[in-house]
Image (tube, grey):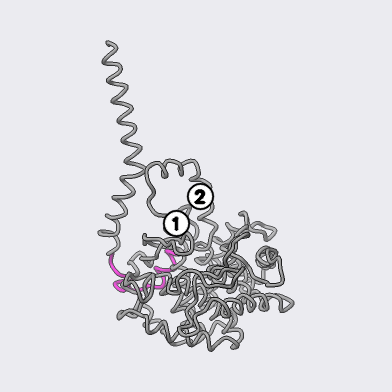
Amino acid sequence: MNEKKKIFIAILCTSLIGNIIVLYIDIIPYIWHHVERKYFQSKTSILDTKHPEQIIIEKSLAMATSKNVTMVWREQLSFSEELQMIDKQKEWETFKRYSYPRAYLLAGLTDYAKARKDTVLMTHIAKAFNTYILNNGLPNFVFDKVDQAPFGIAAINMYQFFGNIRYKKMADYIYKKITSDIKDSSGIILYRNGDKCLINDALGMACPFLIRYQKIAKNNNPINIAHRQLEYYIKYGVDKETFLPTHGIDIKTNIKVGPTNWGRGIGWYMIALSEYTKYNKKRSNELNKLIQTLNKLRMPNHVWSQFPGSSEHFDASSTTLFMYSMNLVNPGIYTRDDIFKILGRFITDQGIITTTSGDTYSINYYSHTFGESELSQGILLMLLSTTYQNISGN
């Protein structure tokens, strides 16, 4: 083989390998995203099945034990940026598996089984949950973010249901971890250490756990800490006319930053407020006024968008958070039939609710991508649990 032919073959092989890499990293993911949205998100509705809740539960259990996380975590990057992410893929997958979507999925599963008083189901859930906890009751993952606090809701439910001290130890550990970062007299739990702003995400992660932890604690500290978070946010971060929360508050100046109509952010604040109101009616006025505003921003098909009032793209995370929060304090606003009538067309016959906006990157920087999510799946189960009993005992 002459030298020119060797060079030609080398160039051809290099070009082929390069094109394959570009296809795998950049072009195929981009095309597949659009194909999936167009052809695969219009699957048969759960309403066409005989036992929708059972299908949802089975899918949720499978999601809880899967190595893959369905939540959309980032936008499609440029080729060079995607290339740089390859060596961080393992770390990235670990981060996703032990963050708030999976945590709220397990919280929803245990809420549902507990409300149904279903020992068989709770035993199945325990097998899934036990993969997240060591024999000594500590998490089997690095717990270093407030996003992980909802794992504690599942631990509390498991402890209350089975009485196994192992689960209480995990809840105790989570409580100590998220409160250990309170450094000053303000008593505020920041989303990340060093943040200049308090964002409402932190309320949605920490407060529901703190309020529920109160029921197994031997003092009033958990509920007092949760109340301080809400008191500060209501004072500085809530619009006095609409009662909508801004996404963030500058902790140095107490100035509101970010929009007040980011749907999931409203939901984070609202779930904290409703869980507290369920325990203590002190903040019921703020919750009732917020509900009035949200009802005005609701779309004609009784659901909400990613940005209520300024967009019409259904967002499962904001909608389920709103509906759960309303039903938690006023059981019966949404009956089981109402829930499926409103949300059924967004739930596939495989048992998964679709169209959740992806993870948010920062204030004023929100995802443009929608997909399936463990978060909405978990909150849907929490919503369904409210239709079986008044869950004040959670």
Q: Quarter of the image holding residue 19?
A: top left
Q: Tell me the quarter of the picture where residue 280 sits.
A: bottom right
x, y (%) of residue 288? 49, 87
Q: Give the residue at mark 2.
A: 92
Mark sitting earlier along the chain (1/2)? 1
Query: Where is mark 1, residue-wise?
Result: 73
* Outermost front residue: 253
Residue contact at pointers 1 and 2, CB within 8 angstroms: yes
- x%, y% of residue 264? 45, 70
Viewer-side residue, 173 vs 300: 300
Residue at 33%, 74% in the rendered image: 344
Left or right of residue 357: residue 109: right
What type is the residue that disc 1 sits on? Trp
Helix, strand or loop for disc 1: loop
Asked if residue 377 shows in the view, the reply is yes
Q: Nearer the viewer, residue 256 or 42?
A: 256
Q: Is residue 44 magenta?
A: yes
Question: Residue at 65% of width from left, 56% of height from top?
Answer: 134
Region of the chain picked out in magenta, as a range: 43-60
Q: Quadrant of the C terminus?
A: bottom right
Q: Establish if 108 lies above or below 138.
A: below
Considering the numbered disc 2 on the image, is that residue within a helix, a strand or a loop? helix
Q: CA distance from mark 1 to mark 2?
A: 10 Å
Q: Amino acid at mark 2?
A: Trp
Rendered image quadrant of residue 377: bottom left
